[in-house]
Amino acid sequence: GEKIRLCLGDHDILAWDGGGFEVAGSRRVSLHDVVCIEVGRQNGGFTSCSYAVENVSEDLCFSLVTSNASLDLEASSLREREALAQGFIMLHAHLESTPMVVL
């Protein structure tokens, strides 16, 4: 499949290039806007897309969910999915406990 590059930048902005997908019309999302991380194919983007339902493995998926959209991701292996999802879960917990400071 097509490769997507994720980049965590200043002010906890996650941006990506490659692929044709956007979240709420953008190729970036503030991690402060993420309300939860869902593991598996349970989120709307995976369940509403017939291609995803038929071709994306439940074991490789996770989603960064905001109040108005989600970034639905498919890893290349179960190990990669677990590492990425757990990393985002830990980062989300850290951001929840730390006030956002913009300099």
Image (cartoon, rainbow, N blue to C red):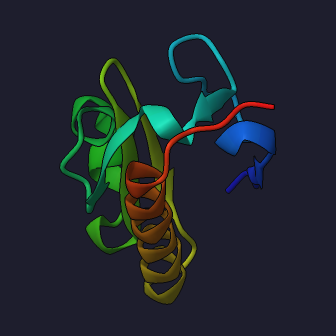
Q: Is residue 18 visible?
A: no
Identify the residue shown where x is 24% and y is 33%.
44
Residue 20's image quarter? Answer: top right
Relative placement, left or right, of 87 versus 49 is right
Identify the residue shown where x is 80% and y is 45%.
9
Relative placement, left or right, of 44 versus 28 is left
Identify the residue shown where x is 37% and y is 23%.
69
Relative placement, left or right, of 13 versus 98 is right
Residue 85 spot, x, y in % from top left: 43, 69
Residue 27 spot, x, y in % from top left: 69, 26
Residue 21 spot, x, y in % from top left: 61, 28
Residue 83 position (above or below residue 66): below
91, 3: nearer the viewer: 91
Residue with the most extreme bottom position: 79
Residue 40's image quarter? Answer: bottom left
Which quarter shows the N terminus?
bottom right
46, 17: nearer the viewer: 17
Residue 12 position (above or below residue 62): above
Q: Is residue 21 visible?
A: yes
56, 91: nearer the viewer: 91
Residue 33 spot, x, y in % from top left: 44, 31
Residue 33 position (above or below residue 91): above
Which quarter shows the C terminus?
top right
Identify the residue shown where x is 39% and y is 56%.
97
Q: How many marks?
A: 0
